[in-house]
Image (cartoon, rainbow, N blue to C red):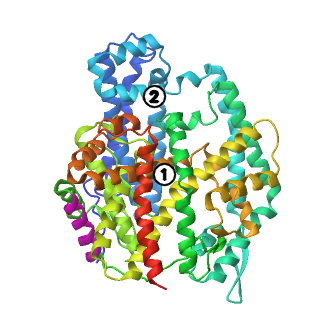
Amino acid sequence: MTTKWDLTFLYQGYNDPQIDKDLEKAEQLADELAIYREKIVSGDLSSKKLKKVFKQVENIRELTTRAGSYGYLLFAQETTNEHHKTLYGKIQQRITDISNKLIWAYLEISKMPEDVASGYLSSPDLGNYHHYIEVSRLNKPYLLSEPEEKILNMKNLVGANAWNNLYDEYTAAFQFEIKIKGEKKILSPGEMLPLFRDPNSSVREEVFKKYYQKYADNSIPITHCFNNIWKDHGQNIELRNYPDTMTIAHVRNQTEEAIVTTMMEVIRKNYDLVQDYYKAKAKLLGQGKKIMGSDLYAPIGKDIKYSWEEARSIVLEAYLEFDNDIGELAKGLFDRNLIDSEVRKTKMTGAFCSATTPNIDPVIHMSFNGTPDSVSTLAHEMGHGIHDLIAGRNQTILNYHPPLVVAETASVFGEQILIKKLLKTMKDDEAKLKLIASQLEDAIVTISRQTMYVFWEKECHELGARRNLSAQEMGELWDNFVSEAYGDAVNFLPEQTWNWSTIPHFILTRFYCYAYSFGMLFVLGLYQKYLEQGKSFIPKYKEILSAGGSQFPVNLASSVGLDITTPEFWQAGFDYLKKLLNEFQELVNKQD
Ligand SMILES: [Zn+2]
């Protein structure tokens, strides 16, 4: 029997009067802070007082995130419930109002002159908040004057934002007419995507062709969206004096250009993993040396099913065998009813672990369906929960959430611990094949493919900053980067040259995709170190988790003796993946 979470440790229900009381209290605390306006930026506030301000901001966040996440969790558990929807909308509005009252403090911290900042940074009173101050100030060199920023903000609504909205709305309305087993169907984009993994190869081929052809048929508005994004970013670089096309992403990810360049080049050098994997998959599917472009995500191997009880005990055992303390934290998530695993019709799809504040337990939302992927999801989300609990022991709210590129540390690490355990106990070769394939495909899509996206995006930004690129030119560039990554392992369909135009990340956020590669390869690098060093690595690993969001990723790694500025660190992740690939190839050869 799957489980339902118990949220009464937050509030007693959607009509609990305490929700309003907490938000009122938060608002009152935010109003009280107004007396310090203009005193931070001028340096007139003593460090002791500034510490008080930070503490008060944390108290406010404690109240708003408790209410905010409760509203979200109720909505996620039953999306059609009108009471929940109303409550969630109301809470969101109030939180926005309260955060608006605090924006001045954030702006003053990011904009204070160097001498004021270094005064605060050298004060021991503010030790706990050093990192927060430093991160807030990363953007300072690229900020313009206040009136200029205002104009840019206003113009953005009809600029990049407008192009993004157009792209989203326009492509979301696409309808695909396809024929499945002789039957005509009209499908939405959301209904098309799962069919990329349909067990039937002719269905996959039809879906791939129709999907990309739709974007080709609409190339005029889509090409306009892309070209305006290239130009907008080009103007931004000029106006703000960014040293590199990708600086904006490095600031967001709290990382540096040299580290990302090193990582991306290591990924490029390891494209043979992609090619060798797909060659082996082609052989397995009986396609000779090349796999069809529409079969990249074809399901393989034998289906196995787990009961919830089996999943629970496998995942718990895996964590307990890894480390007793971590295993006990995982067990606590079950014991305190913090996991909602039941499949319900009105439940939000997908899985997440919601971590609110260091003082509040994380809770897990997922729909357990018994597949190995579902067991993996459980281990993944529990990893997030463990990360939150360990970080919560040492950090306060402003230091609690890890930056995006290292936010998946414990979740992906947890998945590897689970796989190791499953591979050790599995007797059935076909089940093993499926498990390893899903791991390798996940790594290829997350690491190699996302980085290939960024190589293409960078080239387009550099060429497209000053002149319009035609759809054909963007398609040719795309094909070049694709054939570099996939080599001669794949027979792509001609329609797949339009793949670039289907990826919303390019329009929404500049160079978003490398964060995926960074996040996963960082963890696989750590995991390889664990395989080399054994149990002696575990205290270092826990130190990384306990740092939460209190350090830059590079310092986080170096604090435990790992140097992410070197290619060797990133290569370690590939060494691990290549061992998995060897196992996969051996299993494929055995099938002959
Ligand atoms: Zn995750």
Q: Position of residue 54 (x, y in %)?
A: 34, 27
- 30 with respect to 279 (left or right): left
Q: Residue at 62% of width from left, 81% of height from top?
A: 201
Q: How far apart are the two marked residues, 1 and 2, measured between alpha carbons?
A: 29 Å
Q: Which residue matches tag 1?
A: 89
User: Residue at position x 36%, y 47% from top?
Assistant: 67
Label 2 lies in ligand 1 vicinity (Cβ under 8 Å): no
85 relative to 476 in the view: left or right:
left
Q: Which quarter of the rendering shows the N terminus?
A: bottom left
User: What kind of element bears circle 2?
Assistant: helix
Provide residue 66's location: percent of width, then percent of height.
33, 46
* Magenta span contains residue 318: yes
Compare residues 156 and 456 and report the one nearer the observer: 456
Residue 406 position (above or below residue 44): below
Residue 423, x across and y down, in percent: 32, 72
Crowding at dot 2, Cα within 10 Å, few <14 / some 14-19 / many 20+, comes out as some
| Residue occupied by mark 2 | 136
Disc 1 element: helix
Q: Is residue 350 above or below residue 65?
A: below
Q: Disc 1 or disc 2, which is closer to the eye? A: 2
Of all residues, the one furthest to the bottom in this rendering is 182
The magenta-colored residue range is 309-322
The quadrant where ligand 1 appears is bottom left
Left or right: 113 with respect to 415?
Answer: right
**Does residue 369 show up?**
no
Q: Amino acid at mark 2?
A: Ser
